Amino acid sequence: MGKTYERIDGRLRTFIEAQPMFFTATAPLSADGTVNLSPKGLTGSFAVLDELTVAYLDFAGSNAETVAHLRENGRITLMWCAFQGPPNIVRVHGRGEPVFRDDPRFVELLGHFPDIDHTQHGLRAIIVVSAELVRDTCGYAVPFMSYDSDRDLHSRRFARDDDASLDAYFTKKDDIATSIDGLPGLPLPLPPTP
């Protein structure tokens, strides 16, 4: 049954780092605002920075809800499910921050992701999450599913973009600079790749 952890280490860290996919959930402060739930993957795009801090790469996409919610209130929950092996679900509830390309911390943070070519995916920001509550639950109802491989569609789509074409792509999308609920999203024009 469920257990609360003081830190992300040992068996818990090993479990999190072994999962090929996780989910992020954020919401605006407005009671009638849109809750956002996003799947995340791509091998090498997630890192445990220390016992209470994790980060993941935020790549190009058709909206920026997570970024907008974090800029407004910082609340975020990350969740990993065991689709193979013993059943388990781990959630990290905490405060998140998008670190954009023009932030002095960006290059140092990028060093935590040596196994992914971030230039192939239109990297917009690095999301850094400080854990406030770490819990696991049984996961008995989570189905067995196999992981075959990462899809190459994202890298094939965005590998051909440079900073100018990425900025043009983001500018023409409705929910990038502003969220569905009208919150500030990704700052445009897009800062150049450091």
Image (spheres, rainbow, N blue to C red):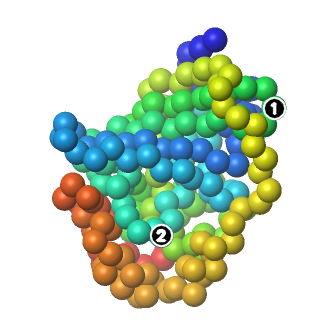
Residue drawn at x 53%, y 44% is: 23
Q: Quadrant of residue 156?
A: bottom right
Q: Secondary structure at mark 2?
A: loop
Residue drawn at x 33%, y 44% is: 35
Q: Which mark is residue 60?
A: 2
Q: Quadrant of residue 163?
A: bottom left
Residue drawn at x 45%, y 30% is: 93
Whether residue 172 sits left or right of residue 118 in the image: it is left
Asked if the residue at tag 2 contacts the one at tag 1, i.e. Cβ–Cβ closer than 8 Å, the answer is no
Of pointers 1 and 2, the one earlier in the residue sequence: 2
Estimate the x, y position of residue 145 in percent, counting from the top left.
75, 43
Estimate the x, y position of residue 158 in percent, counting from the top left.
55, 79
Whether residue 168 sits left or right of residue 78 in the image: it is left
Q: Of tags 1 and 2, which is closer to the observer?
A: 1
Estimate the x, y position of residue 126 in percent, counting from the top left.
48, 57
Look at mark 1 in the image and give the residue it sits on: 85
Q: Mark 2 belongs to which amino acid?
A: Ala
Residue drawn at x 62%, y 42% is: 48
Whether residue 143 sits left or right of residue 37 in the image: it is right
**Residue 144 in view of the camera:** yes
Which is more toward the observer, 173 or 4?
173
Q: Mark 1 belongs to which amino acid?
A: Gly
Q: Is residue 133 above or below residue 120?
A: above
Q: Is residue 125 above or below residue 8?
A: below
Q: Secondary structure at mark 1?
A: loop
Which is more toward the observer, 145 or 80?
145
Quadrant for the N terminus, please: top right
**Residue 5 in view of the camera:** no
